[in-house]
């Protein structure tokens, strides 16, 4: 088996199954009645947590690749990003279906009135074009430069997700602050890398 075949037929499916584990864990807890006194809230929060975690994991791929020189990490970026989107969609669906019972007027009132919901909505709206253009075909159609520019939306989306969490919390802000710290490191890495690239003297072409 070549390394490419091993990656495609063993490692990638394994990572895929691993990404489904939080969902399996949630289903198990639901079936065994282990979701506490407010299972709807627990479900919604669990899915929101994992959407944010997958976003941050996706943002770790580029620094991990650059720091280790292992380009293989890049092969997982799209899958991880799509899992972030899938968990975000499930999170919002649990809010719409389980929490609000599809009461669209109430949901709209929530989006307009509660700032953390507005921020959550904006975050989801930013993730949609990223998921929709994640295929190789879309990279070709858009052209690499435009695709890259569009996918910079992942940065405000990640900031939006952390702000959404921070604003939602009423008293203990430690958890969202930990996520904010991780995000600051991941974004800080990119700022420093871009600055270093810009600071390097232009290569002579003659
Ligand atoms: C229309 C979009 C969204 C709506 C309506 C929404 C709604 C909610 C609600 C109702 C809660 C729980 C509030 C509570 O229990 O008091 C919540 C928490 C949360 N949401 Fe969202 N959300 C949206 C988008 C997102 C997105 C896109 C992400 C991440 C990518 C996200 C991540 C989170 C996180 C991390 C929490 C906190 C979970 C915890 O308490 O551990 N949300 N959201």
Image: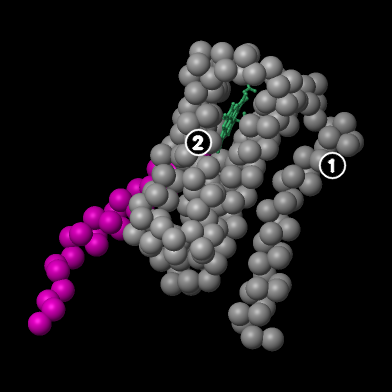
150, above or below 197, in the image: above
Mark seen at residue 28: 1
Residue linked to disc 2:
125
Ligand 1, what quadrant?
top right
Q: What element carries label 2?
A: helix
Structural distance between the alpha carbons of marks 2 and 1: 30 Å
Residue 115 located within the stretch drawn in magenta: no
- Helix, strand or loop: magenta stretch: helix
Q: What stretch is highlighted in magenta?
A: 178-206
Mark earlier in primary sequence (2, 1): 1
In the figure, residue 35 lies in which quadrant?
top right
82, above or below 206, in the image: above
Q: Which quarter of the image is occupied by the C terminus?
A: bottom left
**Residue 178 at x, y = what percent?**
50, 37
**Residue drawn at (48%, 27%), measured in percent from left and top?**
119
Residue 198 located within the stretch drawn in magenta: yes
């Amino acid at each position: 088996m070549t390394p490419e075949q091993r990656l495609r037929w063993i490692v990638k499916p394994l990572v895929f199954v691993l990404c489904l584990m939080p969902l399996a864990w949630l289903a198990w807890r639901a079936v065994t009645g282990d979701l506490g006194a407010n299972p709807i809230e627990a479900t919604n929060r669990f899915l929101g947590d994992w959407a944010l975690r997958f976003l941050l994991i996706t943002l770790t791929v580029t620094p991990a690749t650059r720091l280790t020189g292992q380009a293989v990490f890049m092969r997982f970026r799209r899958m991880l990003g799509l899992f972030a989107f899938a968990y975000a969609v499930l999170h919002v669906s649990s809010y719409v279906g389980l929490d609000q019972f599809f009461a669209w007027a109430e949901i709209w009132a929530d989006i307009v009135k509660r700032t953390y919901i507005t921020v959550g909505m904006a975050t989801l709206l930013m993730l949609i074009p990223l998921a929709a253009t994640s295929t190789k075909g879309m990279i070709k159609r858009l052209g690499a430069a435009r695709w890259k520019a569009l996918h910079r939306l992942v940065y405000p989306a990640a900031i939006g997700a952390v702000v959404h969490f921070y604003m939602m919390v009423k008293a203990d802000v430690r958890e969202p602050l930990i996520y904010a710290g991780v995000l600051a490191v991941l974004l800080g890495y990119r700022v420093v890398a871009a600055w270093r690239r810009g600071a390097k003297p232009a290569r002579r072409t003659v």
